[in-house]
Image (cartoon, grey):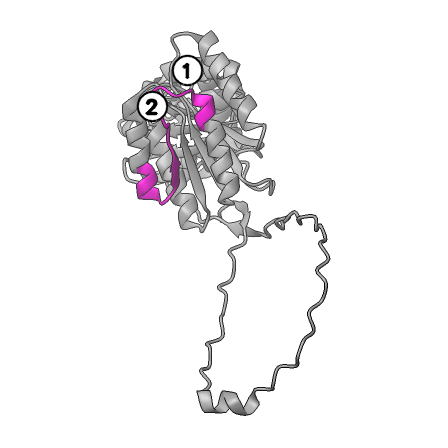
């Protein structure tokens, strides 16, 4: 079952009755002579113009469909024998998979304790314990995107260094929401790279989203983000996704830029989500990036890309354990449909199977 999402209710089609043409002879039969009207003195009156107040669009609750991603995850145990005598090897496997040393030690100790308590000895039984343990430790109440408050348009600010898959993630998310009947606007606020604008334009076209792009090369990113809010409001869009520059060379500049974008956006809208995109193949470098952005961007969730290209899926565990930030989206391919919302039990099954 997918998560709940509130969107504007689609307007019903207007049914217009066809005009019936009446023959001229019949019109004469029903016509009445016009009474003579005496001219009246003209009295000039000043009428105050009425201010049209548009009614708040009705919202409807939608259950977004679920997509599976477990098959795209590389298992931890392709070459390791998994039995009670070799459980110490599990610690090395988890460390290599980027779970982190402390987490690996804790997991192995708990697997041993549960195996002893239940009498588990077979590989199937031990893997079931490990999957259950990983699921318990990764399950969070805040794993869903904040798209159920009803405060439309939902604004999703997307941050992350260049090359991690920000543009692809935005396109996939826009396509997914569009397929669910939502109106999506994308603001191309990564104005420092001309290529970034063209890339996001391609994905906007593929996903059916409206694109707000810079009017001039190098335009202030905050002004593009603000224009995005204006377009989203004017077109009664459900979601506004804002792309941002991915520079980490100077955290002060990054912080100032993101703060400015946040300030101008919040003049018109509430920011529902700050999504940090991380490349799973970068391993612990991804953790360094996550810590840097978490300090300056008020990150509320992580989108983990290229999860199909590595056996280092333990980065999910590290992010949630060390930073306290939930992983919300995962990418497992280059196609526009290779995208899913994170589910702890599905992720654990993929790693352990």
Residue 275 location in percent, x, y? Answer: 47, 28
Label 1–label 2 contact, CB within 8 A: yes
Q: Which residues are magenta?
A: 203-224
**Residue at mark 1 to residue at mark 2: CA–CA distance:** 11 Å
Residue 308 location in percent, x, y? Answer: 30, 32
Residue 254 location in percent, x, y? Answer: 45, 13
Magenta span contains residue 171: no
Q: Quadrant of residue 21?
A: bottom left
Point 46% across, 47% down: residue: 182
Closer to the camera in the image, 348 or 224: 224
At label 1, counting other C-alpha atoms closer than 10 Å, the crowd grade (few under 14, some 14-19, many 20 or more) is some
Which numbered tag is attached to residue 289?
A: 1
Secondary structure of the residue carrying numbered label 1: helix
Q: Is residue 34 above or below residue 261?
A: below
Q: With 353 as the anchor, is 239 left or right in this view? A: right
Residue, disc 2: 164
Closer to the camera in the image, 44 or 113: 44
Closer to the camera in the image, 297 or 289: 297
Magenta span contains residue 222: yes
Q: Is residue 120 above or below residue 319?
A: below
């Amino acid at each position: 079952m997918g998560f709940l999402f509130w969107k504007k209710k689609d307007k019903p089609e207007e049914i217009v009755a066809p005009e019936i043409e009446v023959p001229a002879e019949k019109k004469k039969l029903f016509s009445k002579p016009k009474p003579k009207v005496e001219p009246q003195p003209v009295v000039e009156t000043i009428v105050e113009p009425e201010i049209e107040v548009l009614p708040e669009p009705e919202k409807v609750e939608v259950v977004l469909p679920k997509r599976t991603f477990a098959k795209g995850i590389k298992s931890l145990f392709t070459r390791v024998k998994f039995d009670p005598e070799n459980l110490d090897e599990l610690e090395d496997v988890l460390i290599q998979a980027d779970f982190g040393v402390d987490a690996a030690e804790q997991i192995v100790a708990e697997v041993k304790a549960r195996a002893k308590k239940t009498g588990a000895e077979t590989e199937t039984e031990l893997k079931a314990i490990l999957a259950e343990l990983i699921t318990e430790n990764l399950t969070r109440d805040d794993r869903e995107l904040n798209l159920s408050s009803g405060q439309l348009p939902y604004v999703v600010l997307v941050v992350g260094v260049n090359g991690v898959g920000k543009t692809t993630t935005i396109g996939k998310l826009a396509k997914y929401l569009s397929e669910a009947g939502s109106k999506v606007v994308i603001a191309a606020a990564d104005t420092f790279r001309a290529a970034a604008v063209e890339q996001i334009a391609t994905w906007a076209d593929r996903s059916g989203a409206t694109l707000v792009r810079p009017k001039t090369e190098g335009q202030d990113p905050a002004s593009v983000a603000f224009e995005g809010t204006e377009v989203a409001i004017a077109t009664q869009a459900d979601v506004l996704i804002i792309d941002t520059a991915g520079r980490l060379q100077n955290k002060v500049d990054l912080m100032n830029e993101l703060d400015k974008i946040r300030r101008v956006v919040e003049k018109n809208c509430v920011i529902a989500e700050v999504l940090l995109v991380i490349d799973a193949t970068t391993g612990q470098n991804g953790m360094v990036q996550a810590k840097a952005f978490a300090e300056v961007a008020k990150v509320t969730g992580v989108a983990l890309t290229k999860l199909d290209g590595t056996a280092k899926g333990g980065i999910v565990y590290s992010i949630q354990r060390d930073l306290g930030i939930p992983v919300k989206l995962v990418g497992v391919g280059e196609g526009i449909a290779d995208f899913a919302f994170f589910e702890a039990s599905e992720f654990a099954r993929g790693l352990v199977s």
